[in-house]
Amino acid sequence: MHPQVSRRSLLLGALAAPGRARVIVARDPRLQSPGQGSGLNTGRLIALLDRAVPPENWRRVVRPGETVGLKVNCLAGKGISTHVALVEAICERLQQAGVSRRNIIIWDRLNSDLESAGFRISESRDRIRCFGNDTAGYEDELTVSGAAASMLSKTLTRLCDAIINLPVLKDHGIAGVTMALKNMFGAIHNPNKYHPNACDPYVADVYRMPAIQRKVRLTICDATTAQYEGGPSFMPHWTWPCNTLLVSEDPVALDTVGWQIIEQKRAEKGLKSLKSLKREPAYIATAARYGLGVNDLRRIDKIEV
Amino acid sequence: MDRRSFFLAAAAPCLAATADKDARFIVEARFYEKLPYKKIKCTLCPRECVIDDRERGYCGARENRGGIYYTLVHSRVVSAHVDPIEKKPLFHFLPGSLAFSLATAGCNVNCKMCQNWEISQVRPEQVPATYLPPSQAVDIARRSGSRSVAYTYSEPVIFYEYMCDTADAARKAGIKNCVITGGFIRPDPLKELCRRVDAIKVDLKAFSEKFYKEIVNGEMKPVLDALVLMRKLGVWSEIVYLVIPTLNDGDNEFRGLAKWVKSELGTDIPVHFTRFHPQYLLKNLPPTPVKTLERAKAIADAEGLSFVYIGNVPGHPGENTYCPKCRRPVVERIGFTVKAKRLRKGRCQYCQHPIAGIWEA
């Protein structure tokens, strides 16, 4: 079943047409401004989130009683990771939708990565939990998918019923770009094995592992600060205040739109396109061929809010 | 007390010290180049990973931290046993002796037939480890009666610094060193390694780049180059070729391998054709028929190689070493056990023909 025609496609209040995908592009130029440092205006951030995903629609994403995992991306530390304030706002909306705080888990690969981005590790079951795969561990059995064979995080396989994918918008020196699809490398034990050939087809192979594909309900890409060159490490001189959230049920469409944003910024800064540098993110097209979503911009409805 | 019990008793103080966040495991890597913006290029293996800050290389055992590249597995042992040297297999290196055998987590390739994938295809923090610094490793080797330390099981190239430091300590203690490797290493670190070790067994996974690309996730040419360099530098070497049904078991491949070995390495380097058993990502294939191994041996024999063995078939006459001149068995083996040794000072007891190898410590 195509992600954009699933039962959850009511998220935006209307079904996408068959064969098409929707990506919400929510911008607020005053979310952060020069001189504010890395501080986001939290009130504006919450308002932006609510424009991107109206509060009443969260009940269409998750159900009370489900355990919801928030897969953040903290590899690059505080400079360019999923913002704590955004995650807190999403936790608030999930609770309003009936998900108990005990059933929310913020997770990434390593506790140290989470801490470096400002999250506090917590395994206590009476509050929102936050920990890395190094705490939860990995399954003993391999999951084989195309060219990828990996042990999956137990947070994904055993603890969570649903995943909200919360990547950032970044250039990636090997893969081209990193957003929704590649963020799921954080769910496997051996991402280091899957960077040859610009991560193609590995990113798509990992994402189509059933435990991932079936559980990810929604992607909210934190593009409040984005990076157009030098990733995945944080390179402050190549970041800009993009002041945007990208939201979609279709990870391929979201990555396609995000890639376009990176290319536009690169052109604006006089940098060569990723394609001409031979690091075009070919895995996005592979994911589309697998049926994970839409990568044809003519079939993606970008909805600016 | 059996060997495993001995090791566990000897290593008890070290086992108690296990701690996966221990800074003792983290040592600056010896082979890398610094690049702008805190990136580095690893120059240990032919992959030459370019690695961002806070990222790791393909092996998963080395990490860039603020523009300095570190091994995360120095003294971080995930597997240690006292093995017969025949298990490696090294047949022309101290036959009948014991080798204290060590491994850390990680590997610089990803073979679909890996028999140790639970330690080779994981990151160091994903498996329980023991802190075993070189001096203690050598002490255990000495107390267990091992005549060599073997760096093995996973891929010792990725624990290069630990291997070198342990090899230095072993040599000082009069213990030899042997390396069991895929041979996927760049020339400069290999030269440094060859100064420290006495024998290297190379797993030549196939004689085709296609196989290396599709099954190994590596390249063959750097491995062949490494074999040539080892011979040039005078380190005793043996080759193991795991014969996998339908993937690398063609007569032309066996012949091509034998011809290349003869022309580039000489006829006295042992070549072991060993039997595959289904595991990891190749569970769909059957074990290698013994007849295929016999065919491989016949082809290599016919091409003029002097020491061609059949492995993983206990009791097969292809496990024995035969004098190339008089054809009598000079070392008889069953599995990992040496049943008879008819050598005197490295020569055939019957005809005095020299038999290549390291026969005495």
Image (spheres, rainbow, N blue to C red):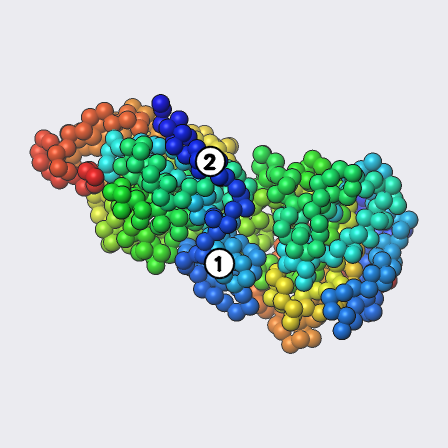
Q: Relative to the observer, which residue lies in front, B50 or B177?
A: B177
Q: Relative to the observer, which residue lies in front, A246 or B80?
A: B80
Q: Is residue A133 left or right of residue A101?
A: left
Q: How many marks?
A: 2
Say the numbered circle drawn on residue B69. 1
Q: Relative to the observer, which residue lies in front, B10 or B236?
A: B10
Query: How many residues crowd mark 2 within 10 Å: few (<14), some (14–19), many (20+)?
Result: some
Give above or below for A100 relative to A235.
above
- Tell me the quarter of the picture where residue B302 sits: top left
Under tag 2, what secondary structure?
helix
Say the numbered circle drawn on residue B52. none
Say the numbered circle drawn on residue B15. 2
Seen at 35% across and 30% down, the residue is B312
- Tell me the quarter of the picture where residue A135 sits: top right
Chain bearing tag 2 is B
Q: Which residue lies furthest to the front in this view?
A: B13
Give above or below for A247 relative to A240.
above
